[in-house]
Image (cartoon, rainbow, N blue to C red):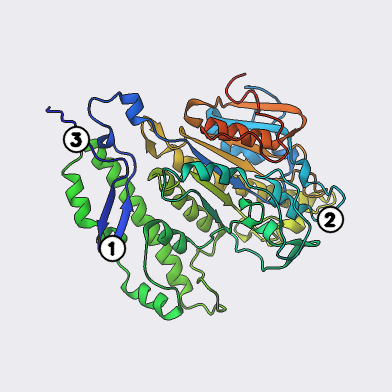
């Protein structure tokens, strides 16, 4: 075999008819004669996946500490990822407490999870929280990626104004803050997210939407010529990777279009963006997760914040036989029926999260997988939804962290250790320097060792 110094640039795109498609990392992108480990080293990705209203701790938290723990019933879906899972207990968001401001724990939970800053109690435009950990990372990673970060969700935001005992809806609608006064909206529409990632000049009025459904061709059809030309320049292994990647893109397109076709004849109120999401929660969540994986895989972004539901959500989950609102169930007052319903919802959420982890683990990335080169934090900023407590938060950190995390353990820290210490450590392990975050007191020990 003749080896040349030619290689594909890391940021290679397929183009056609105005469409542009980023590529995953291919072996052909390694510079010839370069040190293989250095050339192939992929970036570390960060993910923050939020669930509202707390988690029933008796069914979430392992009873044993260290490496010998057993996953409790709610977290059983994480068992296949044991070797890359850290269950963390006794971390707290003290600034989620009232601190003299009275009720409003759900708003404070959303506002503090990634900031560690007590939010200003207001329903007006003078909202104030803190810069969130994802946005500190985004500022650094934006030097290298098309999008500094993505903020996505499954549940549509509440209206403007007050949502929780005198607190603005801004606090419950997002976990991401680019400045103390600027909350980042969560994108819940998969079509809008798809077009943000891959581009589409169409507008979103009803007539254009119906025309698009009749005339839309695949993004891949636009870039077909570019694909054909690229395949002549890459090896067999890269062709297989490229085929799998393009099939994933086409599957996402198909699922979005199916949802749009189902919704096209629905009478919906006039809104800025049409609702084009699957009706079922799991279908919607998994579609957004697949887009999240594609964004990581192509290095369009290295930071994603994902809300499975907005804080204080009262959504029902009929797919698992629960029509009662989630929030209502968490105010169980020790009613065993409501407790059992809450546990079922908690478990259902973890099962959707496990889908994301499986997708990441099955996606090649350099000398490993996306999950090997990621740190994905899952949890809530409330522990007991019945009492609105913000201590001993339900948290799990999953992924290899590019070799900087040692999973397979349940680590119990000193009571009321700031959760922001964990966030600082995640930033540090992703090579993002931050001296302080909210109420942090330093980095968190034992993530890499016993």
Name above or below for residue 161 compared with residue 143: below
Of badges 2 and 1, nearer the viewer stands 1
Quarter of the image where one finds residue 210: bottom left
What residue is pinned by disc 2?
103
> In percent of the image, x 24 and y 40: which residue is there?
8
Q: Secondary structure at mark 3?
A: loop
Mark 3 lies on residue = 6
Q: Which mark is residue 250?
A: none
Residues packed near mark 3 inside 10 Å, few (<14), some (14 to 19) or many (20 plus): few
Of callouts 3 and 2, which one flags the residue occurring earlier in the amino acid sequence? 3
- In the rendered structure, the answer to whether residue 264 lies left or right of residue 345 reads left
Judging by the rendered image, the residue that carries numbered circle 1 is 18
Asked if marks 3 and 2 touch (Cβ < 8 Å), the reply is: no
User: Can the viewer see residue 322 in this picture?
Assistant: no
Circles 2 and 1: CB distance less than 8 Å? Answer: no
| Residue drawn at 59 percent across, 40 percent down | 377
Disc 3 and disc 1 in contact, CB within 8 angstroms: no
- Depth order, front residue of 424/290: 424
Secondary structure type for disc 1:
loop
For marks 2 and 1, give the CA distance. Answer: 52 Å
268 over 322 or under it: above or below: below
Alpha-carbon distance for marks 3 and 1? 27 Å
């Amino acid at each position: 075999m003749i080896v040349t110094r030619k290689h594909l640039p890391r940021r290679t795109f397929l183009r056609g008819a105005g469409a542009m498609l980023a590529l995953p990392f291919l072996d052909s992108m390694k510079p010839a004669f370069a040190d293989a480990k250095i050339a192939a080293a992929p970036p570390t990705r960060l993910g923050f996946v939020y669930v509202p209203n707390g988690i029933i701790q008796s069914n979430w938290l392992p009873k044993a500490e260290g490496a010998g723990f057993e996953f409790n019933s709610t977290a059983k879906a994480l068992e296949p990822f044991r070797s890359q899972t850290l269950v963390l207990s006794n971390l707290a968001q003290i600034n989620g407490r009232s601190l003299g401001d009275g009720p409003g724990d759900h708003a404070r939970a959303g506002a503090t999870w990634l900031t560690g800053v007590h939010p200003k109690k207001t329903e007006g435009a003078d909202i104030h929280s803190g810069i969130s950990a994802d946005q500190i990372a985004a500022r650094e990673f934006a030097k290298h990626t098309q999008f500094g970060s993505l903020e996505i969700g499954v549940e549509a935001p509440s209206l403007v104004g007050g949502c929780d005992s005198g607190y603005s809806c801004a606090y419950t609608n997002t976990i991401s803050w680019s400045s103390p006064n600027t909350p980042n909206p969560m994108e819940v529409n998969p079509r809008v997210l798809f077009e943000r990632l891959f581009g589409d000049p169409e507008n979103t009025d009803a007539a254009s939407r119906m025309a698009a459904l009749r005339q839309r061709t695949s993004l891949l059809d636009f870039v077909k010529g570019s694909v054909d030309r690229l395949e002549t320049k890459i090896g067999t292994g890269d062709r297989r990777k490229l085929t799998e990647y393009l099939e994933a893109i086409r599957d996402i397109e198909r699922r979005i279009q199916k949802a749009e076709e189902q919704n096209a004849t629905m009478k919906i109120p006039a809104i800025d963006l049409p609702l084009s999401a699957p009706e079922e929660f799991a279908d919607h969540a998994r579609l957004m997760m697949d887009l999240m994986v594609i964004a990581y895989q192509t290095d369009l972004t290295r930071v994603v914040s994902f809300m499975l539901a907005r804080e204080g959500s009262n959504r029902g989950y009929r797919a698992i036989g629960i029509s009662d609102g989630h929030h209502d169930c968490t105010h169980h007052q020790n009613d065993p029926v409501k407790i059992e319903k809450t546990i079922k919802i908690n478990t259902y959420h973890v099962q959707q999260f496990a889908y994301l982890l499986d997708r990441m683990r099955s996606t090649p990335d350099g000398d490993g997988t996306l999950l090997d080169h990621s740190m994905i934090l899952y949890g809530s900023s409330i522990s007991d939804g019945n009492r609105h407590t913000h201590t001993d938060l339900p948290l799990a950190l999953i992924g290899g962290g590019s070799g900087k995390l040692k999973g397979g353990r349940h680590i119990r820290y000193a009571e009321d250790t700031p959760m922001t210490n964990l966030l600082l450590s995640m930033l540090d392990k992703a090579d993002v320097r931050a001296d302080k975050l909210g109420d942090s007191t330093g980095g968190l020990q034992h993530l890499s060792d016993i």
